[in-house]
Each structure stands twice: as C-alpha cells, then as structure tokens.
C-alpha cells in the first residue's frame, strides 16, 4: 500500500510516515521530498474574481489530490504490474461533509482507475478564494481538449444558440490549439485554461487514469462564475469511447480508459448532488459514434475547415506530435473520417495505412480491432460484449448496444479499406 497526504502547508506534519508521499496545496512547503499541487493558482483565482462555495472548492481540492496520488504511485511496482493499493489522506475545508460518502467515493475511484483506494477526509484544506465575484455572461460550460469530439461539441452548442464558457486542461501539445478553437467559437476572451501543476521528485506513473478528475474539478470551478443554476457541463465524447469496450479479453476494466464511462459519470454526478454542488454533467453524444458526430455536426463548413487539425492520438508525443495512425484513438478517428466522407481527412499520420504498420511502439491495436470485428462476425455482438453493458439501465441498454455495434462497423470499414480484413 502506498500512503499519500495532500494538505495545506500549515497542516503538514513535521515528520512523515516511512514511505509516505506528501503534497501541499497551492503553496510550496519548501521541504525536500514534499511535492506541490497548483502552486499559486488560488491567488490567481482570487484576482480573477472567483469566489466558489466551500463545497465546490473542496471538490476541486479532492480532484487535484487524487491526480497527485495517481501520478506518484507507480503501477509497475504492484503485485500484478497494474493494480495499486492507495491510501490517500485529503485535507479539506469542510471534511465532515464528505465523511458519509467515503465508501461511494472509494468505489468511484476504483471504477475510474482500477485501483483499491482508502480515503481519509481531514481538516487541513485551504480556504476557498474570496475574490470579488464577477459572473460570466455564459449559460453553460463545455470541455475543450483540442480533440475532435470536443470541437464538434463546441460547434454544435454555439450553432444552436447556446453561450458556452470553454474550459481546458493545459497540455503542452494542445494548448495553442485549445486557444484557437475557443477563439474560433467566440469564447476566446473567457476561455479558462488551467493546469493541475503537480510537481514532485521521482518517477511519474504514465497511465494517468485519474487525470480527468482535474478536468471535472476545473469545470466545477468555472461553473461557480455562472449565475444561473444548475449549470450544465457538457462533456463531448462519442459513445464508443465512453463505454470503451475491451477489444480483446485482456483489456478489461481500467486497462481501457474510463474517463467518461457512464457508470463513473453517474457516480460522479451523485457525489456532486450530495455535496450540494449545483452542476449537471451532460454526455450529449453517448449514443453517437464519432463518425455520426462528424456527419451530424451543425456547421459542416466550419468543421471541414478545422477537423483535420484536431488531435486524437494516444501516442502523439511518441511520434513527435504526429498522429501515429494505428492506436485505438487514431483508428476510431480515421474510421470516423471515412464514415464522414471521402477526402476530408487531411491529418498527417506516421502510418497512413494499418497494413504493415510497425507495432514496436506498443500493443498491436490493429490486430486487436481485427480480432474484435471477427469475433462479432462469428459469435454475434452480444457474445462479444459479454457483461460490458451491465452498467446500463434497461431503457438505455439498447441505445448503448446500438452505438457499439455502429462503432465496430466503422472500424470494420477502416480495416477493410486498409486491407486488413
């Protein structure tokens, strides 16, 4: 078990338990071996007129603390090389509000990261920023990552007459792209780009299954500046990736990312509600494939102009900020462009065809996709899915089944076009 403590500088103990990792929130302790989270961010928020409720601020502190634990606890030192046992102590401004929901939050994190979490909510959080509140003239929040789905989501909202405020999590390769998209969609002046700013000595865990919690924390922070309640937070993600069915039996659970999985999102929504945070998470494309999102986008001309500039690749840095063309996100992207229409994909791929592409950099994703398609052909979709849709309410299970069937159909068309099937 790895122990992690995240608290304010004033509540940091003089000595730490053997092997315990510690982080201070928003201010450096200037102590060897103690990491920092979002140093200086609280002051920046205050200057910019943020005055969130105590419960919203504690949610942000919790999200950033989970991200810190996720980054400093290495998977390859665990018994099976993946599943970790993490004991996380989080300093909060109002810890008693969280105490009754300890088991719920632990289970929610297990769904997200695949690990076993033990949580302790204690005194020691930083007080919320008390800026002079300056409400924004927006009616919702939309997450803007620099990816294709979030681009479509922003276009659709603006075209429908909504006034979204765009929130981004800074990423080295996407930061400028995020700013361009926000400006293109009329929200450049109020675009919020934030980083979790987690710094510590030692190795970092690269899987970052918990990273999305920072994004949700930032969304809640942004929502605190919108006057009308409840605030809708749009999470634009296609349904195939939301569910992210394992293409082969070995990719079960969190080996496939659960960032927007409907089960995790429902548990997160329940947590927001019991904490009295008036935010409603929306997954508007949970029953759409990526190809359907492109075909049905409300402004086809604008989308065609910028779609190929977006990023999707899971190995973007590995290939020097170029799409590899063969990882699962790249295949779903290419399949979506193919479903959208001939000639629209002007993306540069390291491997423009799946046939003969090099698999030395990681798992053989094209082979996994081909095996999935063949399995559906031979045994049927329901046998392939197994218990994948056990999370879904009976009234929605057919819709989720439909989007997975259509998504596999788009992948099959790509595999056929590249000569793998």
Image (spheres, rainbow, N blue to C red):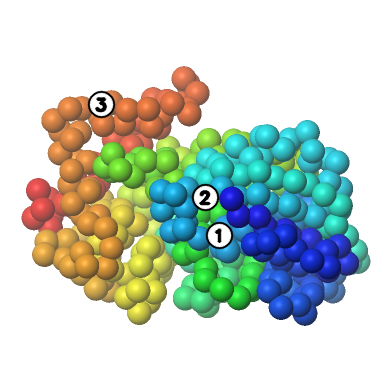
SS of the residue under disc 1:
loop
Task: Name the residue: 75% across, 63% down.
Answer: 16
Q: Is residue 117 left or right of residue 353?
A: right
Foreground label between 3 and 1: 1
Foreground label between 3 and 2: 2
| Labels 1 and 2: the sequence-earlier one | 1
Out of 186 and 319, give the one closest to the viewer.
319
Task: Name the residue: 47% across, 21% down.
Answer: 395
| Labels 3 and 1: the sequence-earlier one | 1
SS of the residue under disc 2:
loop
Residue that label 1 marks: 73
Q: Tell me, yes or no, whether the two marked residues, 3 and 2, touch with CB atoms within 8 Å.
A: no
Rounded to the nearest angstrom, the CA distance separating label 1 from label 2 is 8 Å
Across and down, in percent, residue 291 comes to: 32, 49
Task: Name the residue: 63% across, 73% down.
Answer: 200
| Labels 3 and 2: the sequence-earlier one | 2
Residue that label 3 marks: 383
Q: Tell me, yes or no, whether the two marked residues, 3 and 1, touch with CB atoms within 8 Å.
A: no
Rounded to the nearest angstrom, the CA distance separating label 3 from label 2 is 30 Å
Across and down, in percent, residue 217 comes to: 68, 55
């Amino acid at each position: 078990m790895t122990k992690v403590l995240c608290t304010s500088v004033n509540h940091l103990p003089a000595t730490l338990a053997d092997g315990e990792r510690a982080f201070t929130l928003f201010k450096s302790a200037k102590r060897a071996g103690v990491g920092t989270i979002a140093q200086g961010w609280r002051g920046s928020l205050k200057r910019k007129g943020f005055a969130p409720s105590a419960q919203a601020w504690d949610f942000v502190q919790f999200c950033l603390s989970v991200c810190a634990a996720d980054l400093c606890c290495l998977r390859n030192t665990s018994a099976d090389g993946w599943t970790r046992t993490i004991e996380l102590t989080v300093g909060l401004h109002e810890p008693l509000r969280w105490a009754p929901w300890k088991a719920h939050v632990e289970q929610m994190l297990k769904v997200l990261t695949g690990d076993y979490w033990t949580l302790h909510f204690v005194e020691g959080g930083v007080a919320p920023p008390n800026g002079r509140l300056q409400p924004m003239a927006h009616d919702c929040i939309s997450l803007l990552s620099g990816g294709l789905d979030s681009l479509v989501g922003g276009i659709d909202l603006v075209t429908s007459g909504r006034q979204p405020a765009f929130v981004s999590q800074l990423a080295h390769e996407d930061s400028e792209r995020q700013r361009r998209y926000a400006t293109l969609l009329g929200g450049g002046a109020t675009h919020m780009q934030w980083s979790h700013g987690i710094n510590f000595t030692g190795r970092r865990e690269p899987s970052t299954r918990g990273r999305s919690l920072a994004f949700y924390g930032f969304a809640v922070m942004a929502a605190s500046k919108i006057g009308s309640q409840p605030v809708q937070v749009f999470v634009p993600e296609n349904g195939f990736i939301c569910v992210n069915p394992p293409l082969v039996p070995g990719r079960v659970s969190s080996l496939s990312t659960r960032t927007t999985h409907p089960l995790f999102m429902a548990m997160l929504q329940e947590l927001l509600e019991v904490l009295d945070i008036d935010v409603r998470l929306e997954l508007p494309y949970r029953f759409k494939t990526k190809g359907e999102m492109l075909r049905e986008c409300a402004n086809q001309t604008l989308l065609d102009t910028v779609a190929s500039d977006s990023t999707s690749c899971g190995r973007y840095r590995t290939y020097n900020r170029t799409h590899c063309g063969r990882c699962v996100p790249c295949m779903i992207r290419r399949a979506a462009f193919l479903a959208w229409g001939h000639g629209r994909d002007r993306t540069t791929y390291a491997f423009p065809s799946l046939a003969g592409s090099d698999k030395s950099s990681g798992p053989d994703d094209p082979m996994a996709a081909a095996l999935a398609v063949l399995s559906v052909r031979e045994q049927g979709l329901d046998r392939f899915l197994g218990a994948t849709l056990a999370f879904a309410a009976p009234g929605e299970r057919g819709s989720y089944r439909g989007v997975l069937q259509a998504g596999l159909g788009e992948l099959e068309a790509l595999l056929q076009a590249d000569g793998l099937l």
